[in-house]
Amino acid sequence: MSHSAIQTIMNHRSIRKFKDKKLTEEQIQTIVEAAQMASTSSYVMAYTIIGVTDERIKEKLAAISGQTYVQNNGHLFVFCGDLHRTEQLGSLEDREQMQQSLASPEQFIVMTVDAALASQNAAIAAEDLGLGICYLGSLRNDVYQVSELLQLPERVVPLFGMAVGYPDHEPEQKPRLPIDVIYHKNHYQPFEHQLPFIKDFDKQLHSYYEKRKQNNRNDNWSKQMIRKFSIPTRMDVGSFLHEKNINNQAD
C-alpha cells in the first residue's frame, strides 16, 4: 500500500454536510469498480450496490433515517447483502438443493462481510478522489420500508447506506480506542487488562467532546456504550431476515 493510500485512510472522518454538487458518472463508476476489487468469500460477491438518484426515494430514505444528509449529498449508495442472484443461477432442482445453505447463518455472515469489505474500498476510493463519506446504518430503522422502496427480492437485505459528496464542513477527527484495547496478541486479553486503557480513552474523549466546535458535551465512550445497549433498537431486523429466508437456522 502506498504512503498516499495510508494517509487517506488515516485522515478519515465522517462528513455530514455536503455541497450541492452531484458526482459525475465517472466518479461513481470509479468508486463502484474500487468496491468490486475488495476480497470476497469463495468468489461469491454476495452484495449489490444500489445508487439512489430518484429524489422522491431519497426523501423517503432520509425520513426513515432521520438524517438530512441521506437526501442532501453528491450521491447515495445503498449496500445490500445479496444471495438472490446466486440462487437464481440454478435449475429448480439446484435451487431446492441450495435452500439449506442459502438460509444458513454462515451465508448471512458471508454476505455481510462481502458488502462491508466492498464498502470500505468504496469509501477509500471516494476519499482519495477528494470526496467525503458517511456510513448510514440508520437505514435499518425501517428495513421493511427500505426493502419496499428499493424493490428488493427475496434473499436481498439492505445493510447500510453511504452518502458521498463534496465536503461542506471540516469536522474534527474523532479519537479511536487505543491499539492495546483493539489488538490482542495470541489470545483474547481479559477485560481487566483492557480497562486502564479504556479509562484513559474515556478521559481523552471527554476532552474531545468538551473542546470540539459543534455539539460539545459532557460525555465519554463508556457512558455512550451503556446508553446505547440499554435501549433495544431495530428489533424487527430478525423477523425481516426470517421473511427474506436468510439466517433461518438461527431459530
Image (cartoon, rainbow, N blue to C red):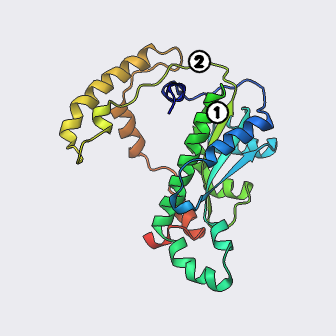
Which SS class for mark 1?
Answer: helix
Q: Which residue lies furthest to the bottom in this view?
A: 93
Q: Is residue 251 visible?
A: no
Three-letter amino acid code at the position of disc 1: Ala
Q: Distance between the residues labelled 1 and 2?
A: 16 Å
Q: Where is residue 215 in the image (x, y as percent from the top left)?
A: 52, 21
Q: In which quarter of the image is residue 229?
A: top left
Q: Position of residue 156 (x, y in %)?
A: 63, 62
Looking at the image, residue 231 sits to the left or right of residue 115; the answer is: left
Three-letter amino acid code at the position of disc 2: Glu
The answer to the question of whether label 1 and label 2 lie on touching residues, with beta carbons closer than 8 A, is no
Give the answer, above or below, for where 72 lies relative to 191: above
Residue at 38%, 38% in the rendered image: 225
Q: In which quarter of the image is residue 206?
A: top left
Reading the image, the residue beneath label 2 is 170
Mark 1: give few (<14), some (14-19) or many (20+) Cα within 10 Å: many
Reading the image, the residue beneath label 1 is 126
Mark 2: give few (<14), some (14-19) or many (20+) Cα within 10 Å: few
Q: Which residue lies furthest to the front in this view?
A: 2
For the residue pair 38 and 173, the one nearer the viewer reads as 38
Residue at 67%, 57% in the rendered image: 147
Give the answer, above or below, for where 144 lies relative to 52: below
For the residue pair 138 and 34, the one nearer the viewer reads as 34
Give the answer, above or below, for where 62 lies relative to 246: above
